Image (spheres, grey):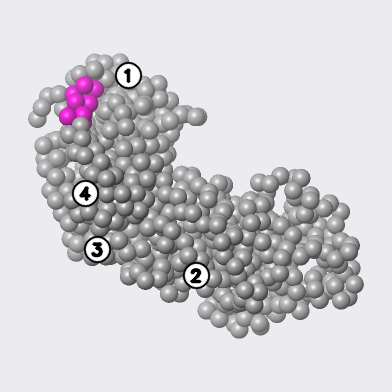
Amino acid sequence: MNQNDIKAVNELKMLAIDMINQARGGNPGIVMDMAGVMYTLFARELNVYPKDPHFFNRDRVILSAAHLSPLYYATLYMAGFEITKEDLQHFRRLDSVTPGLPELNNPLGVEATTGYAGDGVGNAVGIALARRYIEGLIKAEDSKLNLLNFYTYCFLSDADMMSGASEEAFSFASAQKLNHLIFLYDANNMTGEGTLDHVFTENLEKKFQAMGFYVDSMKETSNIKEIARAIESAQKYDGPALIIFKNIIGKDSFNEGKNIMHSGPLSMDDTASLRRKYNLFLAPFEISKDSIIHLGNQIKTRTDKLQKKWQESYLRAKDINSANLNNILALLESGKTSVPFNSANYNINDGYRESLMESNSKILNLIAPKSNLFLGGSAEGSLSSQTLIGGEVYHNSTNVTARNIRFGARDRAMGHILNGMSLMGLRVYGSTKLCFADEMKSSLRMSALMNLPMTYIFTHDSLYFSEEGVSRIPVEQLTMLRSIPNFYTFRPADIIELMGCWEVILNSNHPSALVVTRNSIPKLPGSNAKEVIKGAYIIKKEVSRLDGIIIATGSEVVSAMQIAFDLQKNGLDLRVVSVPSMELFLSMGKDYENLILPKGVKTAVIEAGRSSLWHRFATNENYILSIDDFAYCGIAIEVLQKMSFDYDSLKLNIESLMK
């Protein structure tokens, strides 16, 4: 092996150990295990551009093994990215660009926020899927264009391999035969508790080969030439690849092979012993200029030629002047997709009435022709959730430009895969039943942390579909969705509000949940698409005096309005306020809130969900007509009556409260 390479690997290893030691926390075992692999990737294979970190055709590195972060930061520093020694010294500190677990920061070369075991696997699969899709669109315009041929590399730990989210994502990648996707697995056979004996004993080589993966297994992770050979063999495979590195955790440490290497700093004696063993006599946080130059030159020599070829292909594409291709080139330049949608361009007949799921399907098919970078699918079944883009087949390895994605029963992976696609700048959506939002909490949270303009479409949102059983009836899910910071939940009352929701969603850069009912809903008098951006508005105004206010969302707005009209005959003059998005409403401030919900006026809330977030608006807890317990299996009207949520019960309660 080249002595310069050996020296650089050891310096990286010690630099990462210095970070962990100073922070008094981290995972030194995986850092020591994978230093040779990380260095080989950057030195011999990875096409990255430290001075142009947003270059779209760069290779992506995802750390599903998120505790590998100190080694990754150290390598980025050595490679010449905008990261300083001071940044390394502030590992895990407040406001640092080197947090304990990776956080999306493209200028520094961090491609995704990861943390939970398995999340990054889905992200990597989504990036690979998006790359293949966009490349397919480009090749359809001109087969000679070579604008998107990068690889996605994902580092894995034993925890990632045991995760259910990973299992779903691996299975999807296998079914899709995704290429340019390589997983690098630190198989050190050790958890924080101890060895994997009796915990994880699968024959992974046979398992992944049976799934259609290219599989390579190595016991030596210090031989750069052999690591490079393994990666280059994986690159040639027309499908996903897994390289297993069978490591002894923390090799060369006093505690090599022990579970203590999963957590915390090394002792001063152990650290000093490693420096002597590696023949390094630099101070903590120091690396030699020779190593920086050595790694930087290898990257630059390789990538300069590739970037020049890419520019030639890019100029050729610009000359073609195709509308579809121009749309893609705008994505390659900005990293974002714009999808125009204006609700004012559509007129809905006053007699219109149908399921909001059907209405949503029609709106999706109004949006889809506006951009070939708008696509999505379902984990519930696109026919069930009605999210198919018409006129297109399902996406697979032979139909790489199709926009309907069948995720199978993989709700957890679907969210993470779509996050990966969104990281590529596509506008994507994924659908399933609202009760399954619980399975997607991790991906919902990561969408919000990365501020990705993802759209989650949740269907079957209420008590009206109770025949399947209590476990399928959503109760607490709306509250969960609304509790996520930097995340917007929309529950439209009719097709007009639904169009307004899509207009807001497509004109924002935040992740959103769109909750739609399977109930047949009429076009409501007073509904207003342009008011959705305010989060709440008066959908039915009082006639002459304000006796009270009913707040409602979704299909309950229909009931609220009918109650208001019926009680008007009994001398009660009620206002109805529709709240398609509580988060947007709260962002409007107190002045607007007081305008539509004046203080001192009796205010009730009707929503088929938990009451907990509505207390700030209702007169008191008795004025919240909600569902605070699990429901029942049975015919819908009987369940509604049992839970006092049928129309007659709601009307009687509102009348009693307002009088």
590 vs 530, nearest the viewer: 530
Residue found at x 52% / y 73%? 358
Residue found at x 56% / y 54%? 504
Question: What is the C-alpha distance between the residues marked 4 and 3?
Answer: 20 Å
Q: What residue type is labelled 2?
A: Lys
Q: What residue type is labelled 4?
A: Leu
Residue 537, position in %: x, y?
Answer: 71, 57
N-terminal of the two: label 2 or label 4?
A: 4
Looking at the rendered image, the disc whose residue lies closer to the viewer, 3 or 2, is 2
The magenta region covers 292-301
Identify the residue position indicated by label 3 in the image: 397
* Image mark for residue 362: 2
Identify the residue position indicated by label 4 in the image: 145
408 vs 56, nearest the viewer: 56
Q: Which amino acid does label 3 sit on?
A: Ser
Identify the residue position indicated by label 1 in the image: 284
Question: What is the C-alpha distance between the residues marked 2 and 4?
Answer: 34 Å
Whether label 3 touches label 1, CB < 8 Å: no
Question: What is the C-alpha distance between the residues marked 3 and 2?
Answer: 27 Å
Q: Quadrant of residue 28?
A: top left
Q: Residue 523 vs residue 86: left or right?
A: right
**Secondary structure under badge 2?**
helix
N-terminal of the two: label 3 or label 1?
A: 1
